Image (spheres, helix red, strand yellow):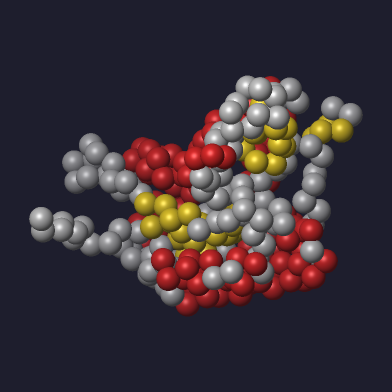
Amino acid sequence: MRQILPAARRRRIVLAGDSTVAPYVATAYPMSGWGAHLGAALTARCAVLGEGTAADGAVATALHVIDLAKNGATTESHRAEGLWSAVLDATATGDLVLLQFGHNDQKHEHLAAWEGYTENLARMIAEVRALGAHPVLCTPVARRHYEGGKLLRTHGEHPTAVLALSETFDVPMLDLQSRTRALITTLGEEPSRELFTQLPAGSSDLYPEGIEDNTHFSIDGAIAVAEIVAELLAPLLQRLSAAGAGGAPGAERSMAGRR
């Protein structure tokens, strides 16, 4: 059978990050990273905005997401393990590369917010732009850690460092820290458990002893976060499309801004 290839490669979204973004094997169910659900959410958002639709505006063309995030990844280990090389290999002119790290960097002194973490992200930004693609920074998503009825901030200075990088290099930033904190607090301390992988003992053959995880999302939580990412990212895609079919290097600058 003759293989049918698309007439032209469409813009893709490439993800680099940690376990909150990463794809999961079936045996981890219901644990999920938001990257697994971004394609559907983003395609739907862009269809509403008129980006990625057919000529008659009736049918949305799927936006493809390449998820190269990994459990436990830092800005350093992602490169050392060859995943960053894979990100660059998967990226072409006009693509978007989303960077969401911090959960694991903060565990290492040399990857402190204003030291290795910032240096590594700055290098990633430069390498993505060298390919004619568009880097997009993301602050780390919030953990569900409550104390005395108050949701704690557990990422130290790392979200602030992402904001500073965004301003220094004029890179779009998606403030997922603020948006996921708002999602958790709006739901409330107990109802927000549904966003995370929490199962009582005996309720799942995959977690016979149960699990109470306040970092890693459930399927429903991952979908909710993917919808937030899509909401913030779709306008940037629309603006890049308006700026030109390929989107020249640096064309993303000052377009998405701080959401």
Q: Is residue 110 above or below residue 215?
A: below
* Residue at 66% over, 56% down: 72
Q: Position of residue 10 (x, y in %)?
A: 30, 58
- Residue lying at 58% horizontally and 56% vertically, measured from the top left: 70
Residue 41: give x, y in percent of width and height: 43, 39
Front residue of 34/186: it is 34
Query: Of residues 222 and 181, which is closer to you in this image?
Result: 222
Residue 160 relative to residue 56: left or right: right
Q: Quadrant of residue 42?
A: top left
Does residue 33 sit above or below 10 in this rendering? Answer: above
Question: What residue do we see at 65% from left, 29% from top?
Answer: 208
Q: Residue at x 65, y 67 (%)?
A: 77
Which sits in the foreground, 182 or 70? 70
- Specify whether 112 is left or right of 233: right
Residue 250 in sight here: no
Which is nearer the eye, 82 or 179? 82
Q: Quadrant of residue 243?
A: bottom left
